[in-house]
């Protein structure tokens, strides 16, 4: 009887191990700027811009399973990293184009809103000795609206939008109370610790974030207007010369000459 019991335990352990999933460490997407900082020492007379706190808006149309998933946590972290890098890029672009970054007495304000829309459909929950997981159809849309506004009401609006061409299939482990904990599919709260079945969709999401970042950064460089400095010295000099010429034409007697008519 003991031999039969040991045999059954061995078989169950083998099945559970066979169903166990590997875990990968996948770094967060890297948003590497291509913007070079120019010499900004000549910006002392440029208009001042106050960069407002960037906002992240998230529209969610997904299951409660996805809410707690590692992929969702990774998307949240990616949005924060994206926002931080774009704000750094905005600062560099503004300074390269002749503006000063300031908190007080600003002539302009810059505002950024990043919006992420997440859609999950066809949600199917599966159970096995290795744990429980969900397979579903997933769509991600990334959008951003940027506004450079002057005090007199003039605004420059810059927008970008990127999404998957088609919905992708995702598979992710979920929390479960049943099964063998030792052999459960890995459910992690760490956004870089990814279950084997989830790794492919994670890379697709990362690539979409990087694509969106590059597009947004390029649009900012193209659309933010360059400040053209017009010195008052040139204007003043021109006015003085014009006034002198007018005086010369209206006074035919030069150098205090006295002309006596006979």
Image: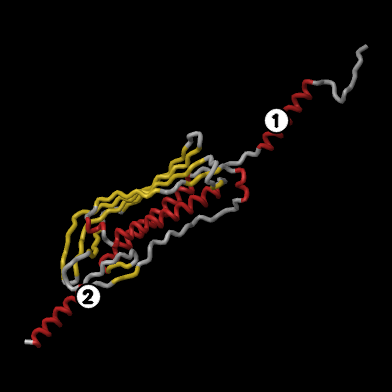
Does residue 97 appear to the left or right of 138 in the view shown? right
Q: Between disc 1 and disc 2, whose residue precedes?
A: 2
Secondary element at image label 2: helix
**Mark 1: few, some, or many residues within 10 Å (few <14, many ≥20)?**
few
* Quadrant position of the C terminus in the picture: top right
Q: Residues within 10 Å of mark 2 (few under 14, many from 20)?
A: few
Q: Quadrant of the N terminus?
A: bottom left
What residue sits 91% from the left and 13% below the top?
A: 261
Left or right of residue 81: residue 261: right
State yes or no: discs 1 and 2 in contact (Cβ < 8 Å).
Answer: no
Q: Which of the numbered marks, if any, corresponds to residue 100?
A: none
Q: Position of residue 130 (x, y in %)?
A: 19, 71
Residue on which disc 2 sits: 182
Name the residue nearer the viewer: 66 or 162: 66
Q: Which mark is residue 239?
A: 1
Q: Secondary structure at mark 1?
A: helix
Identify the residue at image location x=45%, y=55%.
Answer: 85
Task: Give the total number of marks visible in the rendering.
Answer: 2
Question: Residue pushed farthest left?
Answer: 1
Report x, y in % for residue 16: 18, 76
What residue is rendered at 39% in x and 56% in y?
80
- Closest to the camera, between mark 1 and mark 2, is 2
* Colouring style: secondary structure
The answer to whether residue 179 is left or right of residue 83 is left
Image quadrant of residue 211? bottom left
Residue ranking furthest to the right: 262
Label 1 vs label 2: CA separation? 86 Å
With respect to residue 193, does 230 lie above or below?
above
Rendered location of residue 184, percent (x, y) = 21, 71
- Quarter of the image for residue 164 reads bottom left
Q: Position of residue 142 (x, y in %)?
A: 34, 51
């Amino acid at each position: 009887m003991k031999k039969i019991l040991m045999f059954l335990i061995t078989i169950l352990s083998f099945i559970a191990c066979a169903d166990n999933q590997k875990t990968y460490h996948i770094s967060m997407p890297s948003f590497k700027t291509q913007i070079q900082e120019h010499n900004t020492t000549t910006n002392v007379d440029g208009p001042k811009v106050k960069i407002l706190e960037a906002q992240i808006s998230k529209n969610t149309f997904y299951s409660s399973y996805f809410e707690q998933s590692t992929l969702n946590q990774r998307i949240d972290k990616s949005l924060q990293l994206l926002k931080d890098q774009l704000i750094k890029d905005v600062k560099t672009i503004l300074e390269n184009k002749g503006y000063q970054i300031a908190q007080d007495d600003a002539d302009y304000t810059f505002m950024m809103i990043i919006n992420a829309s997440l859609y999950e459909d066809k949600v199917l929950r599966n159970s096995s000795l290795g744990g429980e997981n969900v397979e579903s159809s997933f769509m991600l849309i990334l959008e951003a609206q940027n506004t450079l506004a002057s005090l007199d009401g003039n605004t420059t609006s810059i927008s970008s939008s990127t999404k998957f061409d088609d919905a992708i299939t995702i598979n992710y482990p979920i929390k479960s109370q049943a099964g063998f904990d030792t052999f459960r599919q890995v459910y992690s709260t760490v956004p870089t610790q990814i279950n084997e079945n989830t790794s492919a969709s994670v890379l697709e999401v990362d690539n979409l974030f990087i694509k969106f970042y590059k597009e947004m950064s390029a649009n900012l460089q193209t659309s933010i207007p360059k400040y053209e400095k017009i010195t008052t010295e040139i204007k003043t000099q021109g006015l003085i010369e014009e006034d002198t010429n007018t005086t010369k034409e209206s006074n035919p007697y030069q150098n205090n000459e006295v002309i006596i008519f006979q």
